[in-house]
Amino acid sequence: MDAVLWTLNLPTSLIMFLSMYLLAYFVIFRNWTSKLRAEVSSCFISLVHGTPAVIFAVQALLHSQNSHSYASPNSDLHNRVLEFSMAYFLMDLFHYIVFFPTDILFILHHLATLYVIVTCRYMVHYGAYGILVLLTLAEITSLCQNMWTIAGFRRADVSVAARLYVSLSPPFLAFYSVVRGILGPLFVFKMVMFHLSEEASLVPGWAWISWMVVIVTGILVSILWVSNHWIEWLRERSHLAQKKIR
């Protein structure tokens, strides 16, 4: 696994994600409508990024000496994972700019995420431990979320997709709620407490404060997003129950 991770610098990762996007758009989902082809191609590269990013991040954290501190220096393995994720967000940002330029929320999300990754990797050179733990928490739901999202694209016209969407909704939303609504905020709270202490002097104030602003904003948006989907799911359950009574 380390050998694979060492090959994933920024240029090679960019080429890989571009290739995966083109493969999805022109081959795997070529028979879908043009709008859905773009959306599902974005989900496809998210699948390619999500679970591997979790594995790579855990691998880097476990195999980097003296890395278990919010202000420890970035190891070479840390930097490889940051570059791998940087490539994904750059590719998906390009996707949104080309196909969905009015989707300002996602564009701002990707720009903010790239700001944290780029400054941690190329300017501060410290603090990757906390960023990679948060990356793990963010991407651990990726597999389930993308399967759920792709099924949702076709649930109106494909019965298998509709059943998959319905069966995945409660466990996915519950899993997402726990990770983004409980584990993420707890870890961020610990980060803030650490950076407010004198131990955090190796990470400049402008860096960790701006990182926290981006991360806390992202968590709040995630909580709002999953809350809206819980409301929608409960509304659908209520509607189905009323239809059965009738």
Image (cartoon, rainbow, N blue to C red):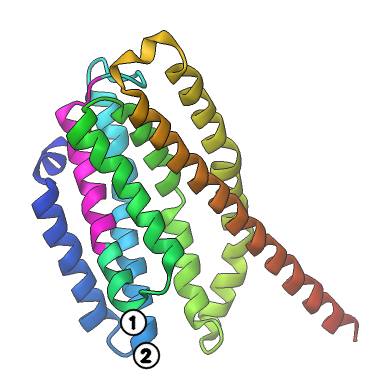
SS category of the residue bearing label 1: helix
- Residue 1 to residue 160: above or below: above
Instruction: Point out which mark residue 33 bears.
Output: 2
Q: Residue at position x 44%, y 73% from top?
A: 150
- Position of 15 with respect to 56 (left or right) is left
Secondary structure of residue under mark 2: loop
Quadrant, the N terminus: top left
Q: In this figure, what is the number of numbered marks?
A: 2
The image's mark for residue 187 is none
Determine the CA span between mark 2 and mark 1. 6 Å
The quadrant of the rendering that contains the C terminus is bottom right
Residue 106 picture location, percent across and down: 42, 62
- Left or right: 18, with 66 as reference point: left
In the image: residue 14, left or right of residue 56: left
In percent of the image, x 16 and y 36: which residue is there? Answer: 2
Q: Nearer the viewer, residue 36 or 100?
A: 100
- x then y, percent, for residue 179: 54, 42
Q: Is residue 89 magenta?
A: yes
Specify start and end residues of the magenta stretch as a single range: 73-91
